[in-house]
């Protein structure tokens, strides 16, 4: 069979042991696929979305209830964004728990971490673009966190929201960041990330002399598996989008007040829970930055796995990195659960 363009995007062969689902979990490929779904459905929504405070919420209602298949497209956009955060986190955990961040892949690990941050901000800006009553608390609290930064907070706040207070310019700024600034960053970093995968030697594997299984699969088999995974992911995404609608509230009015039970988006609930403890700058800015910095320093703080354990789950030689990431994950999950519990 003559290779197609898509076949040429893959190496001629890869080790069979490291190509199995139980090793990769399919998280990296699914993340790329979900990013493509978000791009396509986002472009379709742009034909009907009106980025003004007076019409933004109403245009979302129109997409959902009046545009043919608009509800399915909007739901696919919403759920693909939520699933992308999950698959990106799983991919990060897999990389750490298999020691795949070790040299020469440490820079690509940082690119992947940057992609996760971009994904979170893309999801948050998209959440704000709904411009309905349910996003008001997250908009006010999130932008006020920027204002809490000493010395530069006020200037950053004005740049972010388009003035000294929330206004019509705020929606315009978030719309511009969502469809241009952050999307451009996502495309650049994702392309760079995928390029570095090939540049750094493909998937992490032990040296040839230390491998117990020398079996390899061809690019044709790899593409076949990816197509099957895409078909399965599309079916699941369509079913979820058909039967579980994306959140929708009444359009936000100028005099909207903070709702009685304010909630941040689920992926920032852990930050919201910490804000209940004390100082907004410390718990809402410094702690998340500290968590991100600790994750970024893993390839540089901890020894790389020994060659014989490369390409395997839970190598003993990087046990401390596994403990650090597991602790961070449990910390975030616990705070998220606490934030989701009903208040008395």
Image: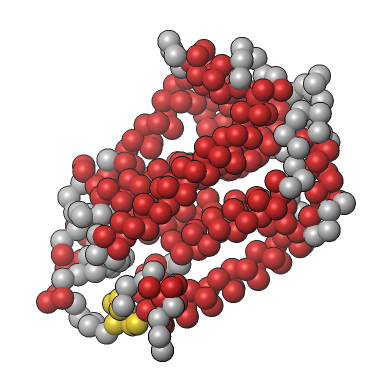
Residue 303, visible in the rendered structure: yes
Residue 137, image x and y in percent?
68, 27
* Quadrant holding the N terminus: bottom left
Residue at x 32% of width, y 73% of height: 11
For the residue pair 2 and 234, the one nearer the viewer reads as 2
Residue 43 position within the rendered picture, expressed as x and y whole percent measured from the top left: 65, 51
Left or right of 186: which side holds 133? right
Left or right: 300, with 271 as reference point: left
Q: In this view, does 266 lie above or below 251?
A: below
Residue lying furthest left: 209
Residue in the picture at 27% in, 48% down: 107
Which quadrant of the figure has residue 199? bottom left
Position in image of residue 281 (x %, y %): 47, 19
Q: Residue at x 84, y 53 (%)?
A: 67
Q: In which quarter of the image is the C terminus?
A: top right
Q: Position of residue 103 (x, y in %)?
A: 20, 54
Identify whether 47 is placed above or below 72: above
- Report whether 272 appears left or right of 89: right
């Amino acid at each position: 069979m003559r290779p197609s363009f898509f076949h040429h995007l893959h190496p001629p062969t890869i080790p069979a042991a490291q190509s199995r689902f139980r090793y990769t979990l399919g998280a990296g490929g699914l993340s790329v696929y979900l990013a493509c779904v978000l791009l396509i459905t986002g472009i379709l929504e742009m034909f009907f979305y009106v980025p003004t405070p007076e019409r933004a919420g109403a245009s979302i209602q129109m997409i959902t209830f009046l545009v043919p298949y608009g509800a399915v497209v909007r739901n696919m956009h919403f759920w693909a964004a939520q699933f992308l955060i999950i698959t990106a986190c799983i991919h990060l955990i897999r990389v750490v728990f298999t020691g795949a961040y070790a040299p020469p892949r440490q820079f690509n690990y940082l690119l992947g971490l940057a992609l996760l941050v971009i994904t979170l901000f893309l999801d948050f800006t998209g959440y704000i673009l709904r411009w309905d009553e349910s996003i008001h608390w997250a908009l006010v609290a999130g932008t006020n966190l920027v204002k809490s930064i000493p010395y530069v907070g006020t200037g950053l706040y004005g740049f972010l929201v388009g003035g000294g207070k929330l206004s019509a310019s705020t929606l315009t700024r978030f719309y511009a960041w969502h469809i241009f600034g952050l999307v451009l960053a996502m495309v650049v970093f994702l392309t760079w990330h995928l390029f570095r995968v090939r540049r750094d030697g493909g998937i992490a594997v032990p040296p040839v002399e230390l491998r117990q299984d020398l079996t390899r699969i061809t690019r044709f088999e790899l593409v076949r598996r990816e197509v099957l995974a895409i078909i399965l992911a599309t079916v699941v995404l369509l079913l979820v989008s058909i039967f579980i609608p994306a959140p929708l509230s009444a359009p936000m009015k100028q005099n909207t007040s903070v709702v009685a039970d304010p909630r941040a988006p689920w992926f920032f609930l852990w930050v919201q829970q910490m804000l209940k403890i004390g100082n907004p700058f410390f718990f809402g800015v410094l702690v998340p930055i500290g968590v991100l910095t600790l994750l970024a320093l893993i390839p540089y703080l901890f020894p790389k796995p020994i060659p014989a354990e490369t390409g395997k789950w839970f190598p003993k030689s990087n046990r401390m990195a596994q403990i650090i990431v597991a602790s961070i994950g449990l910390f975030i999950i616990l705070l998220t659960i606490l934030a989701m519990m009903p208040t008395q």
